[in-house]
Amino acid sequence: MIRAVSVDVAINLAQFSQQLFQSGLEHRIVEESGKQTIWVGSDREAYVVQQRLNDWLQSAPTPEEISAANAGPALKTTAIQYGLLRWLVATWFGFRRCPITWSLIAGCVAVAVFSRLGDDTYSVRVLFYPLLPEDSLVQLFLAIDSVAEAIRTLTPMLLHFGELHLIFNMLWLWYFGRQLEKLQSWWVFLLLVMVTSFVGNTAQYWHLGYNNFGGMSGVVYGLVGYAWMIYHFIPRTGLMLSNKMFVIFIAALFLMEVLASSMIATAAHAGGLIAGVMLGGLTAAYYRLYLRQDMLGHSLK
């Protein structure tokens, strides 16, 4: 985050902050040493905030007017209304910036509610991986002869069994999905999700021989592998993923295989991770060797 401007705490920035959110400019206002500091995500946004604040201060109310306006029982109602409006605006612009991530989260939550967190699998049976011959991968791929079956190779990612299964997957999807979707085109991110989901689900089905599994874990591990390759080989992307975090994910995968392989779709995790690492490597090579620039458009020369 970048410090855009600091003003006196006596100035009520609520209306100004609301105008910034309505225009799509995400920011944070923090009180620091008797000042209100507005933080933004880039130098360009900082310049915009400075210009808009100068214009807004020309018509801003005085501290005395603010105190008079905030007096009485209307203060609590106004604060609640402002907080709700701010949350709705932030949610809307968050969805606009990361529509695939938020749509996946909404879809998983909706399926979890409809299936009662996996207790009622019959009502969501259409989302399970299609029953295909698993003698060999070639036969399995050739048996996918319709669009409906191709879609069903992806839809197990929407299924979750239990509260913790859903919560942990949604948290990591939100964490990595937002970063990667903001970094590249939405269709590239969607393709990444589809490939890691297909590879992870297919690996799990081929490993088990039956289709009673589900979860976003394969995609999450695919995003982890992809993000780690981008973080490692393309500079200045701003991804929040360290080598230590990547090692923790790998260690967790081994522990799940050793301690709970019969309960957890570890093949889906591994398949998604491998697919993500390979796609991340191809993307890094494309940017470094062909475009000779990072993912933000800066030259690597």
Image: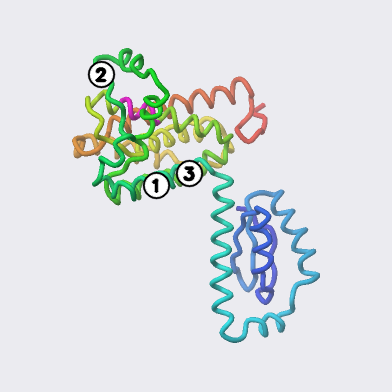
Q: Identify the mark nearer the N-term, 3 or 1.
A: 3
Q: In the image, which residues are magenta?
A: 197-203
Q: Which mark is residue 170?
A: 1
Whether 92 is drawn above or below 132: the answer is below
Task: Tell me the distance, in whole angstroms, between the alpha carbons under discs 3 and 2.
Answer: 31 Å
Q: Nearer the viewer, residue 142 or 69?
A: 142
Label 2: element kind: loop
Q: Residues within 10 Å of mark 3 (few under 14, many from 20)?
A: few
Q: Residues within 10 Å of mark 2 (few under 14, many from 20)?
A: some
The x and y percentages for residue 107 are: 42, 44
Q: Tell me if residue 202 is in the magenta stretch.
A: yes
Q: Amino acid at mark 3?
A: Ser
For image coordinates 27% across by 14% down, the residue present is 136
* Position of the C terminus by quadrant: top right
Q: Amino acid at mark 2?
A: Glu
Q: Nearer the viewer, mark 1 or mark 2?
A: 2
The quadrant holding residue 199 is: top left
Task: Give the side of residue 138 with respect to residue 264, left or right.
Answer: right
For image coordinates 59% across by 86% down, the residue present is 72
The x and y percentages for residue 96 are: 58, 46
Residue identifier under label 3: 103
- The answer to whether the residue labelled 1 contacts the one labelled 2, judged by CB atoms less than 8 Å apart, is no
Q: Which mark is residue 134?
A: 2
Task: Tell me the distance, in whole angstroms, between the alpha carbons under discs 1 and 2.
Answer: 30 Å
Q: Amino acid at mark 1?
A: Met
Whether 174 is drawn above or below 131: the answer is below
Q: Nearer the viewer, mark 3 or mark 1?
A: 3
Q: Identify the mark nearer the N-term, 1 or 2.
A: 2
